[in-house]
Structures are given as C-alpha cells and as structure tokens.
Amino acid sequence: MNFLLTTSWYLFTVNLISCSITTQYYQRLINQRTKEALEYKLPNSNNEFKQGVECENTEEYGEFDFVIVGAGSAGSVLATRLSEIDDFSILLLEAGGEEDDFSQIPALWSYNQFSEKNWGYYSIPQKHFCLGMNNRQCAVPRGKLLGGTSSINGMMYSRGNCKDFDQWYQIGNRGWSCKDVLPYFKKSENTQIHGDENYHGKGGFWNVEYPLPDSPLYQNFVNGSLELKQPIVEYNGKNQIGTSHIQSNIKHGRRQSLATAFLDNSRHRRNLKVLTKTLVTKVVIDPQSKKAKGVEFVTRNKKFHVRATKEVIVSAGAINTPQLLMLSGVGPKDELSKLKIPVVADLPVGKNLIEHLILTLMVRSDYTAPKICINELIQQYLNGFGALTKGGNMGGVGYIQTKNDSSEVPTIEILVSAPPHIDSSIFQREFNYNKEIIDRLLGTIDPQRDIFFYIVLLHEKSRGRIFLNSGSPIDFPNIDFNMLSEQEDVDTMIEGVKYVQQLIKTHAFRKINANLLEVPICTNFKISSKEYMECLIRNLAISGSHPCGTAAMGPNNGNFVVADTLQVHGVGNLRVVDASIFPSSISGHLNAPTVMVAEKAADLIKKEHKYL
C-alpha cells in the first residue's frame, strides 16, 4: 500500500512539473511572437527567391506523375487523396515553411498575419472603399506555409448556401449542383456537432467542433435575433438564414489546418514528396502541342525543372494562381503581350475577382469580460477550452436576407465578437487604417471592453481583377478589388448596418445597456443618415480575406478559364484546383468550399486515369 501511495504521489508530482513547464513554454512563446508581430515588416516582393530566379543554370529534378503547385487548403487535400493510389507519384511544392505551436492557437490568429507565414500582399490604391487606409490600400493576408490560409485564418467552417452551387450548375458546370457537391463536403468532415441529419460527415480527416464554452454574449445575440424573427438554425444544414453557434475547424481547441488534418496523414507515404521554401516560377507548356510538361521552380538559391508525366495542378490560391498562369502564357492576350510574355492561351485569367466586404461596428455596454490571468488561459487551452480556442473571440453568427424575405439565400452575415479583443497596436496593423482614422477610433473605442459586430457583404456585384506588375516572378501581382463600385453593394451594406441598429435595440441587448458608438468620422453628415453610413462603409470597411473567381469555371465561350473538369481551356494536362475556379460568390466563408473542390477534383482525376 505504501509503495502504491508513493508511486501515485510521484506520478502526480511529475504531472504537475510537466504541466508547469508546458505553461511556461507557451507563456514565453506568446510573449515572444506577439512582440515580434508588432515589429515585423511585411515584404513587398518575393526577393528571398531572387538569387535562385537569377541563377543561370537550371538543374533537372526528375519526373513525377503529378506536380501540385501550392500546399494550401486545396493542395494539401489533393496531394493526400492522389497519394492514396500507390501507382501515382506526386510532388507537392510550397513557397512557405511549416506550421508551429503558435499558429495553432486560434485566438491569436491575427498575429500570424505579421510574420513570414503571410505573403504580405496589399491591394493597389482603391477608388471606392478602403478610403481610410494608408494610401487607400487594403491588406490582403494570404497564408504562406503548409496549409496556406487555413493556417492563419479565423477557422470558421461555413459551406455557403445550397443555391450557390445550383447557380454554378446553371452556368453550365455539370456535376457541381448542390446535390452533387454535398457528398464531398461530408467526405472531408469529422463533425463533433449535432447538426441537421444527412448534412454532415463523420470519420473524415477534418475536425469540426464548437469552441467551448459559449461566449456570455451568445444568448444575448440569439434572443435579440429571435425578437427580430430570426430563427435558430444549423447554418451548414437544411436552412441557413437565422442565428447559430459558430462551427470551427479546431480539434480539442487547437487549430486544425488542412496541413494538420490531411498532410500529417500522408507525408510519410513513399509516393508523395513535399518541398517547402520553394517558389514555382513557371508552368512549362509545349507551344506546339499546348500541353503542360512540368514546372520550373527555385529553392535554396537554385533553379530546377521537373517533368510532370500526367498533369500539372495549380493550387496556389486566388491571388497566386492567376499570377503563375499569366507568367506561363495563359491569360489575357493584350496584357501578356505588353509584358512580352509569349501567349499560349488567350483566357480571362485574373478577371472576375470576387471578395467579401467587412464593416466593424463597435458597441458600448455594461458587459464586462471576465478577467483571467495568462497562465489560466494557457491551462484552459491545453485542456481544449477557453478564450484561446476561439478565433476572434466570436460569440455567434447570423445570416440575414435584406432584400427578399422569401429568398433562401442570405445577403449579409453578422458576427458578434466579445471583448477583450486584440491590443490596439495589432488592431492598427491588421486593418492598415491611416493615422487620422486610428487616432479617432482609438480615442473612442476600448478593445478591452467594447462589443464588435462584423457586417459581411456576401454577394457583391462589383468585380475586381488580378494583373501582373511585370514579367518577373519576383514582383508581387497587382490586386484591384474594385469593391463598392456598384451602388447596389453599398445599399446592401447599409441594410446590414440598419439590422445591427435594430438588434441592439432589442430587449436582449437593452438588458446590458448596449449602445452603438458614434465614431468621429464622416462628421460632415448627419449621424445615421444614408450618406453618413455610406461614408463609414467606404472609409472603414475592409476586404474579407475571401478572394475567389480569378480562374473561373464554366463553358469555353471566352468568359471562363477552366472547364467543369477543372482543366484549363485549350491547354492539355493543366488543371486549377482552388478558390480561383469559383464562378460566382459564396454565402459563407471559402475554406470549406475550397476543400470540397479539392475532394471532387481528386475523384475526377482518379476516374480519368481509371482508378475509380
């Protein structure tokens, strides 16, 4: 008995020491990385690869059946699924590096945007929105590491609306209707929620769960929405319009990127090779046969050429995919000719850039956030719950229809975020507001106390484009969102603002004495007038980090880049598999639909090569 007691006490003591060491590690890690984020200078080019690009000698890297460009959301899934076939050989090329312990902490996701994990893109100066930003340029965070943007985003699992995909089908994309794509959403999913029957998958690689515990504001949000006749729904199920808990891609409270979910299950396979810190500079296309033969890439200050015996698959995302295609001669003839790039296929690459728009409204109330020391927060995180497990400390999501009450497709997404928020320094860097705007905002709001409402425009009518800055892969592409160029988009956002104004007047929010903060911006207009709200939107709204549509899928009629098989029109052995192929907007966030596209693409490829 004494021996057992001694052994038990020894094990208990060891666990306490181990727990203490782990907590100290995370405390140091958080302190170090948050400080580094405040000082990190984002790059304005791919200069780290310059020596390799300018290298005179090109070495051969052998051959693989499939060469996949980009190990982001789509690339990670595709490489995993294709490597299930032992006869296939796959090379996966990623410009960034690996994930780490810090990037897996959901609540600190904004800090990852100021590190080498982010490409560092900004839009060109905008004419219609981002007017309150430095040089009128919007920040465009894109993940540059294994897992891509799924490794630095807010982790919300949101598929969109069933009718979004029916619209894809109606454009002429066979096999892309709602009933066609639902099995692929379910295939990747390992749901931990009690969702609508027949809408969710169990046993997939990608975990979906609710962050715990509920935000104290969640019940206010739900009850207020009910007062406005908005039902409680499961937004990835039968009905989307209404209010719901947020479903997140976390596992036991930690971020589960697509690299963690998929690549961690496949990198050991003998037929899959993954190269990081590798920039693909060109898809090699035979000018006579118009077939992709391989790619050129640089890594470790050397230049290489690799052959693809079956296909080159570009999964570099909605910004980098069109850049690479255009550098390779696939794109608008007039633009490529100006840069002296030989034209292989005259296609509208880079056109049809679609984004979501986000406006933040700040609300002052009697709500006070519970004060918890960092050690306790870390302990909670290590046990799979607590504030650190929540991206943006979100307290709930609502989908509303502002134009037609009978429509099943929402026009606006509403997110509510409970304090405390990120500190004011990273707040300024994240949104790129100019000094005048920041001074006025920080003189009014309290990130440690105020409630933030995020109003998201889901279906913008405005369209932007990606175009080359030069013929060099070293230079970043030009990003022109052109958002709010259509007045209808402004009017829809104003309806979203009015909805939040109604929401905070409900009994549920009056109980906590909620009042919309009047930020001293646009003071030449009457408060709450249409002109005032439009001024706020044009100055303060930001891009939603959900770009898509720049290599759109549809018939070969001059308006689209890829067919419904995802093969590039007029170019053999070349596919695009990522959010670039979305032909129209999505009523939700883009990560889940991108994974669906990759799952379906893998089956299309397996069938074509007679392995399915």
Image: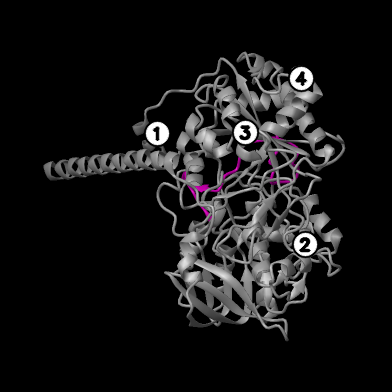
Q: Amino acid at mark 2?
A: Trp
Q: Is residue 237 left or right of residue 555?
A: left
- Binning the other alpha carbons within 10 Å of mark 3 as few (below 14), some (14 to 19) or many (20 upward) gives many
Q: CA distance from mark 2 to mark 3?
A: 30 Å
User: Based on the displayed image, in which of its 4 quarters is residue 244 positioned?
Assistant: top right
Q: Position of residue 35 (x, y in %)?
A: 39, 39
Dot in front, 4 or 3: 4
First in sequence: mark 1 vs mark 3: 1
How many angstroms separate mark 1 from mark 3 (CA)? 21 Å
Disc 1 and disc 4 in contact, CB within 8 angstroms: no
Residue holding disc 3: 396
The type of residue carrying mark 1 is: Leu
Q: Distance between the Cα atoms at labels 4 and 3?
A: 32 Å
Q: CA distance from mark 2 to mark 4?
A: 46 Å
**Side (left or right) of 103 relative to 237:** left
Q: Is residue 596 visible?
A: yes
Question: Can residue 386 be spotted in the picture?
Answer: no
Q: Is residue 236 magenta?
A: yes
Disc on res. 218: none
The residue at which mark 2 appears reads as 176
Look at mark 4 in the image and give the residue it sits on: 525
- Magenta region: which residues? 232-258
Label 2 neighbourhood size at 10 Å, few (<14), some (14-19), many (20+)?
many
State the residue at coordinates (79%, 35%).
490
- For the stretch drawn in magenta, the main secondary structure is loop
